[in-house]
Amino acid sequence: MNWKAYQKPGSVTEAIALLEQAAGRGRVIAGGTDLVLQLRQRARAADLLVDVTGIDDLRGISEKDGWISIGAVATHAEVAGSLLIRREARALAEGCGHVGAPQIRNMATLMGNVISAQPAADGAVPLAALEAEIRVVSITGKRWIPIEEAYLGVGRSAIDASCEVATEIRFRKPGDGAQTRFFRLSKRKALTLPVLNGAVSILPDPSSKRISRARIALGPVAAKPFRARRTEACLESGEVSPELIEAAARIAAEEANPRTSLFRGSAPYRKDMVRLFLTRTIREILAAV
């Protein structure tokens, strides 16, 4: 270990003051499942760790005025088990339920999954489909960051944990009648990175056979969770039919840009899996509405 001090503040204001005093040599820690390993391997350095898990304002999962809010120290297990999340954003509960093993899910936070900035993160991909925002507080004030803007590249976050505290994830309720689903392809059922994952959110038009709103996020097919916007537009373009679903799935395979990987397989194979899994997931959602 290469840190010199460990502090556990009782408020966000106190946490920010500690980071400011550390002058860039501090680091926010919550679950620590990624950060502690990075510190051990000297992939990151910090003189001071600021543990935010004791801040009550960062806890909880709630709904207010059409928004769902998830506190920064909510674990994957808490999100996966939340009745509110399972009812309103099933894809997010499913994604969080696939992270690591039970021990990891009990420690690791969803916010940490976002800040780690990995394009295949099972918790972050559904957040992209839900068009989530991240609330960040620093010495200069507060700001909301759309989740797509929170990624600067693989492993590079727009949230600077040496001087900023991410306090909340929020997203609008998908809407009455909306359905969301998560899918994942991996070499085994647990403790393995995904070959492919994705989240789909569909709001049908109750007055017609059309889709009012489609949101699709895929990983790891780009340097961040990838919004398949051409695919979304296709699904919203006409009456639902087998042909429309197949056309949308083909477009998704075209706009996804996975790379060939010894671990994850060839790019053509992964594109074909995008088409297959998206077709299956859209059909499952439409059968449920």
Image: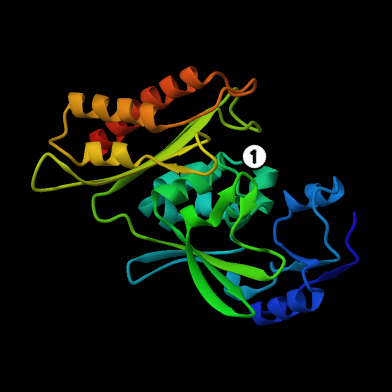
| Quadrant in which residue 158 is drawn | bottom right
| Quadrant in which residue 263 is drawn | top right
Q: Residue at x 48, y 42 (%)?
A: 94
Q: Is residue 79 above or below residue 91?
A: below
Q: Residue at x 58, y 28 (%)?
A: 189
Q: What residue is pinned by disc 1? A: 100
Q: Residue at x 42, y 20 (%)?
A: 272
Q: State the image coordinates of residue 159 (x, y, percent, origin top left).
A: 61, 62
Q: State the image coordinates of residue 255 (x, y, percent, origin top left).
A: 38, 32
In this rendered view, identify the residue nearer to me: 229 or 70: 229
Q: Is residue 209 above or below residue 212?
A: above
Q: Is residue 60 visible?
A: no
Q: Amino acid at mark 1?
A: Gly
Q: Residue at x 60, y 50 (%)?
A: 113
Q: Is residue 32 visible?
A: yes
Neighbour class for label 1 at 10 Å: few (<14), some, many (≥20)?
some
